[in-house]
Image (cartoon, rainbow, N blue to C red):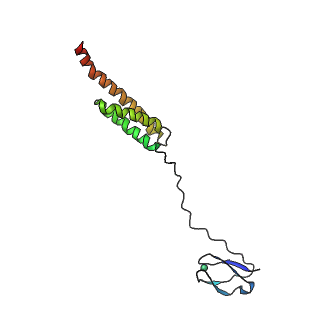
Amino acid sequence: MPIEFRCVECQVLLRTPDEAAGRAARCPECGADLTVPAVGAKAPPRPLPAAPVPSRPRREPTGRENEAVSAFVLGAASVGFFCCFPAGLPCAAVGLVLGIRGRRSAQRGLAMAGIALSVLGGGLGIAAIALGLLPRLLNVF
Ligand SMILES: [Zn+2]
């Protein structure tokens, strides 16, 4: 039964007849100087390969996180711009949509905040329009 052992350098599995036990040998693969182990010696287990690169627990990039963040930003913008409604209302509308879409993401809190801010901004925007038009309406009548 031939002796099986691994090269200490390149780990290639070597096989040599029993007579070679204890003798010096040379790895045919890498040329490293080896000593053939005694008969019956088990082939040492292959050393564990370098720690595998931990596969990052990556969430599927759905883009929902971005939507949640955008919802929050747009919601905040709609509140800030409510007085100039041409900017505030679209921000509120888009923020609301993105917030609803972003609710399923990891940024759920941010999406909900975006929805709340968008609703607030939209309400304020509509109120601003109403208040802005009211004096004109009163003037008409
Ligand atoms: Zn070798």
Image quadrant where one finds the N terminus: bottom right
In front of the other: 80 or 17: 17
Q: Quadrant of residue 116?
A: top left
Q: Is 49 in the magenta?
A: yes
Q: Position of residue 57 (x, y in %)?
A: 53, 52
Q: Main secondary structure of the magenta part?
A: loop
Looking at this view, name the residue that lies furthest to the right. Answer: 1
- Residue at position x 68%, y 78% from top? 5
Q: Residue at x 59, y 76 (%)?
A: 10
The image position of residue 98, as x and y in percent, is 43, 37
Q: Residue furthest left?
A: 139
**Residue 96 at x, y = what percent?**
42, 33
Say whether residue 35 is visible: yes
Considering only vertical position in the picture, is 106 above or below 54?
A: above
What residue is at 60 percent from the left and 80 percent from the top? 29
Left or right: residue 19 versus residue 54 is: right
Magenta stretch: includes residue 21: no
Location of residue 100 with respect to 13 vertically, above or below:
above
The image quadrant that residue 26 belongs to is bottom right
Q: Tell me if I can see residue 117 in this picture.
A: no
How many marks the image carries: the answer is 0
Q: Determine the quadrant in which ligand 1 lies.
A: bottom right
State left or right for residue 13 relative to residue 126.
Answer: right
Look at the picture and state if 40 lies above or below 92. below
The magenta region covers 42-52
Residue at left offset 30%, top offset 30%: 85
If the image is split into quadrants, where does the C terminus sit?
top left
